[in-house]
Amino acid sequence: QVHLVESGGGLVQAGDSLRLSCTASERTFSDYHIAWFRQAPGKERELVAAIDWNGHNDYYEVSVKGRFFTSRDNGERVVYLQMNNLKPEDTAIYYCAGDSNWGRLAAGKPDYWGQGTQVTVSS
């Protein structure tokens, strides 16, 4: 089991950057692939980015590719989502999620979810 906690959200202007963090206290953190999802008002939750357990492989949704980057430090039990050149359409609640099964994670059905952090981008 792992408890995930997001931080780093806030209100920024278009073109600005933010870095989200997803942390856990459990030593088993390194056993889990981690993904970032987001949900905008009136829209379904979508997968934004994901990183495998050792950080060797990652995935990005097409609309964020080249602007968002995810990385992890298993020693510090943290996964980051660096978001650059933010756009108003990036406004959403961002969730990190974890699962030992990559397919389950990518399908949006991970075992563990964080509570979410709000990102608001003004034009």
Image (spheres, rainbow, N blue to C red):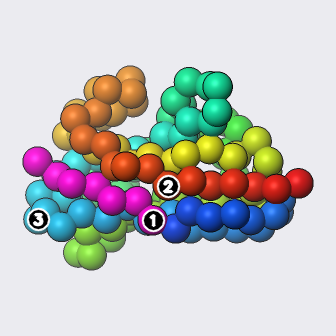
Mark 2 lies on residue: 117
Q: Looking at the image, can residue 116 be seen?
A: yes
Q: Position of residue 51 (x, y in %)?
A: 39, 49
* Rendered position, 31 above or below 82: above
Label 1 vs 2, first from the N-terminus: 1
> What stretch of residues is rendered in magenta?
1-7
Few, some or many C-alpha atoms within 10 Å of disc 1 (few <14, some 14-19, many ≥20)?
some
Q: Position of residue 74 (x, y in %)?
A: 25, 68
Mark 1 lies on residue: 7
- Cα–Cα span, label 1 and label 2: 6 Å
Q: Nearer the viewer, mark 1 or mark 3?
A: 1
Mark 3 lies on residue: 27
Which residue appears at 79% of the width and 48% of the height?
Answer: 88
- Three-letter residue code for mark 2: Thr
At mark 1, the secondary structure is strand
Label 1 vs 3, first from the N-terminus: 1
- Three-letter residue code for mark 1: Ser
Q: Position of residue 46 (x, y in %)?
A: 54, 31
Which residue appears at 32% of the width and 26% of the height?
Answer: 109
At mark 2, the secondary structure is strand
